[in-house]
Amino acid sequence: MQTTLCFDFGNTRLKCAVFQNSDLLDVVVMDNDATETVAGIIEKYKPTRSILSSVITHNPEMENLLAQHTRFHKLNHLSRLPFTTPVGKPETIGADRLAICAAAVHLYPKQHNLAIGLGTCITYNFINNQHQFLGGSISPGMNMRFRAMHEQTALLPLVTADHNFPLVGYDTKTNLLSGVILGMAKEIDGIIEAYAEKYSNFNVLLTGGDMGFFVSHLKNRIFADPYLLYKGLYAINEFNCP
């Protein structure tokens, strides 16, 4: 039995997924990246391997700690990947995008895949059936849109995402909810349809912390998986720390 820690440090949350062999055992939400916090996770799960995906400036000491107690890999543009990146400046590709691309290839090999991440930003990531990550696009995420309307106007309030709102908003809050959430859903459907004009047959994978607000509003067939990024990290670790 081999235990692997997959750390995902995003702009909003710090999390660690725990795998036993290839099975996802647990997801730990971390309050911080202090050495004591990471040490506690190591003590609890006794891992043999670990991988870190980080898009923030994190505590560098945690890398030393993980290297001391596990076979550690930090995801970066030099990592061995189950796909190629024939794009300009591969070093600029976010670690989170690399992870969900790896998951798409792992789950649906030799197929076209559009992997969409709904986090601080929306990322659209296309991997063709030759396992080439061709790129995609990035647009503002849900909370970024709520904040922008509040911060760049004099009177619009900052609202919290909510599942309950009508198509036709009846007050300021429901107008903002309808505009952002339904607007994003239409954007996602529109991007999928644009890809469909170019690639007739492909899978659509949806993941990210905001995924739950959109699944019911999308008309296209999708594979929704909140743990897609972690599965991708595990797949990448298989390449780099066998």
Image (spheres, rainbow, N blue to C red):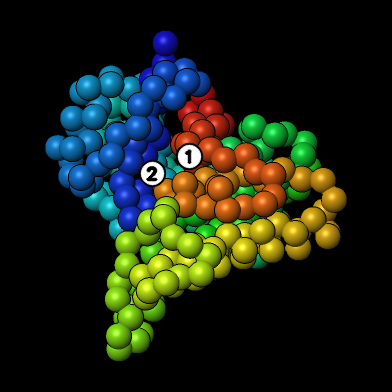
Which of pointers 2 and 1 lies earlier in the amino acid sequence?
2
Secondary structure beneath dot 1 equals loop
Q: Nearer the viewer, mark 2 or mark 1?
A: 1
In the rendering, which numbered label is found on residue 226?
Answer: 1
Relative vertical location of residue 166 with respect to residue 109 in this rendering, above or below: below
Decide if residue 186 is on the left or right side of residue 47: right
Residue visible at 19% across and 32% down?
A: 39
Residue 208 can be seen, yes or no: no
- Residue 14 is situated, as x and y percent measured from the top left of the image, at 31, 46
Mark 1 is on which residue type? Pro
Residue found 36% across the figure and 85% down from its top: 152
Quadrant for the N terminus in the image:
top left
Q: Which amino acid, by three-letter code, is at mark 2?
A: Asp
What is the crowding at mark 2: few (fewer than 14 residues within 10 Å), some, or many (at least 20)?
many
Q: Is residue 203 visible?
A: yes
From the viewer's perspective, tell me whether residue 61 is left or right of residue 97. left
Task: Specify the farthest residue to the front.
Answer: 170
Q: Nearer the viewer, residue 117 or 95?
A: 117
- Residue at which label 2 appears: 8
Residue at the farthest left position? 36
As drawn, 205 above or below 137 = above
- Residue 153: % across, % down: 35, 86
Task: Say few, some or many: other residues with alpha carbon within 10 Å of mark 1 (under 14 / 14 to 19 / 20 or more).
Answer: some
> Vertically, is 45 above or below 221?
above
Image location of residue 115, percent across then percent down: 62, 48
For the point 48% across and 39% down, which residue is it?
226
Q: CA distance from mark 2 to mark 1?
A: 13 Å
Q: Quadrant of residue 43?
A: top left
